[in-house]
Amino acid sequence: MRVVGVGCAPGLLTEEAKRVIADADEVYGSRRALALAEDPEGGREIEDWSALDQLPDDAVLLSTGDPAFSGLGKHGGPDDVPGISCYQLGCIRLGLRMDETVPLTTHGRDPGDAADRISSLLDMGLNVFVLPGGLTAPEIEEVARERGAETVVCERLGYGDEAVVPPGEEHREPFSVVAGRGVESPG
């Protein structure tokens, strides 16, 4: 199976991804991934994510963003196609250097372990770009505040209504939380 990153928002599909998708006999993905891939002919929405190992060997599996960042890359191999991730786009929007910012997902992770990891990275002077799931935006904000860091939430990066806002209880999907010293909403 080949995993293809379709980007984190409309218009971010790479030329290589378009070519691989167009040449594929079978394309699978989430509703959002299929939409970002411009609804390829014959594309099939995956309903049972636990059955990915039953997909045909020559199938193309679509991953939102980049498959290597909290994506489906663990199911593919060296021929996977990277995509533009929310991490990349968020660093651009916030003026952060990617080599001073660590991407981290808390999806399916123990909240205590995720909080400890965020704390450790902040203590090293790094910014942390978090895909929440195991921790909420307010919980990430609390961890950052304890370390003297600030947080912002990046909502719907790459969509026409994207916004960078303070943490709170409710955010528009998809969203990410960025913590670090000097992290702030753009002017």
Image (cartoon, rainbow, N blue to C red):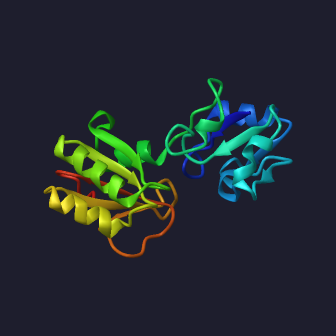
Residue 137: horizontal and vertical position, in percent?
Answer: 35, 66
* Residue 92 seen anywhere in this rendered image of the structure: no
Which quarter of the image is occupied by the C terminus? bottom left
Q: Going by the image, does 87 lie left or right of 3?
A: left
All told, the count of numbered labels is: 0
Q: Residue at x 75, y 49 (%)?
A: 51
Instruction: State the residue lying farthest toward the left.
Output: 148
The image quarter in which residue 5 lies = top right
Residue 100: horizontal and vertical position, in percent?
Answer: 26, 37
Q: Going by the image, does 14 lie left or right of 34?
A: left
* Residue 59 seen anywhere in this rendered image of the structure: yes
Instruction: State the residue lying farthest toward the top.
Output: 78
Residue 1: horizontal and vertical position, in percent?
Answer: 74, 33
Q: Residue at x 54, y 40 (%)?
A: 66
Q: Nearer the viewer, residue 16 or 145?
A: 145
Examine the rendered structure and indicate whether residue 137 appears above or below residue 35.
below
Examine the rendered structure and indicate whether residue 37 appears above or below residue 147.
above
Q: Going by the image, does 120 lie left or right of 175?
A: left
Q: Nearer the viewer, residue 152 or 18?
A: 152
Q: Nearer the viewer, residue 187 or 147?
A: 147
Instruction: State the residue lying farthest toward the bottom.
Output: 169
The image quarter in which residue 145 lies = bottom left
Residue 172: horizontal and vertical position, in percent?
Answer: 48, 69
Q: Residue at x 57, y 33 (%)?
A: 82
